[in-house]
Image (cartoon, grey):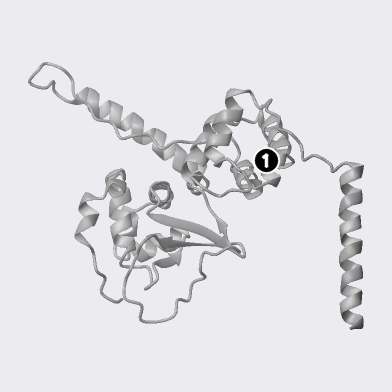
């Protein structure tokens, strides 16, 4: 395993600070596992054996799913699929490249995996159990000097209320791929199984609008927020069909071009 350069900025990184303790340890260990391009398999069992080779029992696979999702949420790691197989890449790895990567690159042909798609139902159960355990531990703590019970609970991992496939379908069809983390969060907040049909009908109207045809497209998070506030009833002007007079002018212009071209060929 080649040596890695760990830059001092990691200890003051706002994104790393947002990780739980377990996720940060996972992130640090992962740096010693990925190749020179920051790539590796995104399979929990493989990550467990690679990052904890001597004590795999310290890192249950369900916990690794949660830690990986935290890193993806903070944009420290990108997870993607190529031909049905999942891989990851550490963002801004910037290490010395010694050999060609055996892992595929995340390009336009790959499918980006969102954070919530990495968490299994068992992982969610472990999160709930962890929160219950934390509440019990807080209750057992002695009061502070002020006489108040002090308890700092870890922030829960946000879970979307819609099927993950809906988000993939939505962002796959939306013409602008910007602010994806904010858009995913807004999608999970606003879209439910009950209103998903209205959401996609609203998207169809937007895609057929003159605004999109001219290339003036809203960021997806703003679109979701604005349309959700209007209960997905938004409508936009359609592209205008050219008048008969305009079509005649265009056809006449094309005929003139053809005649001029014919004369030049003859000369």
Quarter where residue 162 is shown: top right
Q: Identify the residue at horizontal 58%, vertical 24% (top origin).
A: 229
Residue at left 62%, top 44%? 216
Q: Is residue 104 left or right of residue 252?
A: left
User: Which of these two is toward me, 165 or 170?
Assistant: 170
Position of residue 80 relative to residue 114, above or below, is below
- Residue at the image position 57 percent from the left and 40 percent from the top: 218
Residue furthest top in the image: 147
Q: How many marks do you count on the picture?
A: 1
Residue 214: percent from left, percent from top? 68, 46
> Looking at the picture, how far across and down is residue 94, in whole percent?
33, 68
Residue 121 rendering spot, x and y as whole percentages: 51, 41
Coordinates of residue 227 in the picture (x, y in percent): 61, 29
Circle 1: element type:
helix
Q: Identify which residue is drawn at 32% across, 66% down.
A: 53
Work out which quarter of the rendered image holds the N terminus and state it.
bottom left
Q: Quadrant of the C terminus?
A: bottom right
Which residue is more in the foreground, 14 or 22?
A: 14
Say left or right for 14 vs 247.
left
Residue lying at the far left of the rendered structure:
145
Sort mark 1 into few (<14), some (14-19) or many (20+) by Cα contacts within 10 Å: some
Task: Give the answer, above or below, for where 68 lies relative to 211.
Answer: below
Tell me which corner region of the image, top left, top right, bottom left or bottom right, holds residue 123: top left
Read off the residue under disc 1: 211
């Amino acid at each position: 395993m080649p040596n890695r350069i760990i830059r001092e900025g990691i200890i003051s990184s706002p994104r790393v600070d947002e990780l739980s303790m377990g996720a940060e340890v996972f992130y640090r260990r992962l740096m010693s596992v990925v190749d020179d391009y920051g790539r590796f398999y995104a399979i929990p069992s493989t990550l467990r054996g690679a990052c904890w080779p001597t004590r795999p029992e310290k890192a249950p696979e369900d916990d690794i799913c949660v830690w990986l999702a935290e890193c993806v949420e903070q944009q420290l790691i990108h997870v993607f699929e190529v031909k049905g197989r999942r891989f990851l890449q550490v963002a801004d790895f910037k290490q010395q490249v010694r050999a060609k990567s055996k892992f595929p690159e995340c390009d336009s042909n790959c499918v980006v995996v969102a954070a919530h798609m990495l968490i299994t139902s068992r992982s969610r159960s472990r999160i709930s159990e962890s929160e219950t355990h934390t509440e019990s531990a807080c209750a057992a703590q002695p009061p502070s000097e002020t006489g108040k019970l002090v308890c700092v609970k870890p922030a829960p991992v946000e879970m979307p209320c819609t099927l993950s496939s809906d988000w993939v379908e939505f962002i796959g069809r939306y013409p602008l791929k910007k602010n994806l983390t904010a858009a995913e969060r807004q999608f999970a907040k606003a879209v439910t199984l009950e209103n998903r049909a209205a959401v996609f009908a609203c998207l169809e109207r937007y895609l057929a609008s003159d605004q999109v045809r001219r290339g003036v497209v809203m960021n997806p998070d703003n679109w979701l927020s604005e349309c959700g506030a209007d209960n997905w009833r938004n409508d936009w002007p359609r592209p205008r069909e050219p008048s008969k007079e305009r079509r005649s002018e265009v056809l006449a212009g094309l005929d003139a071009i053809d005649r001029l071209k014919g004369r030049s060929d003859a000369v």
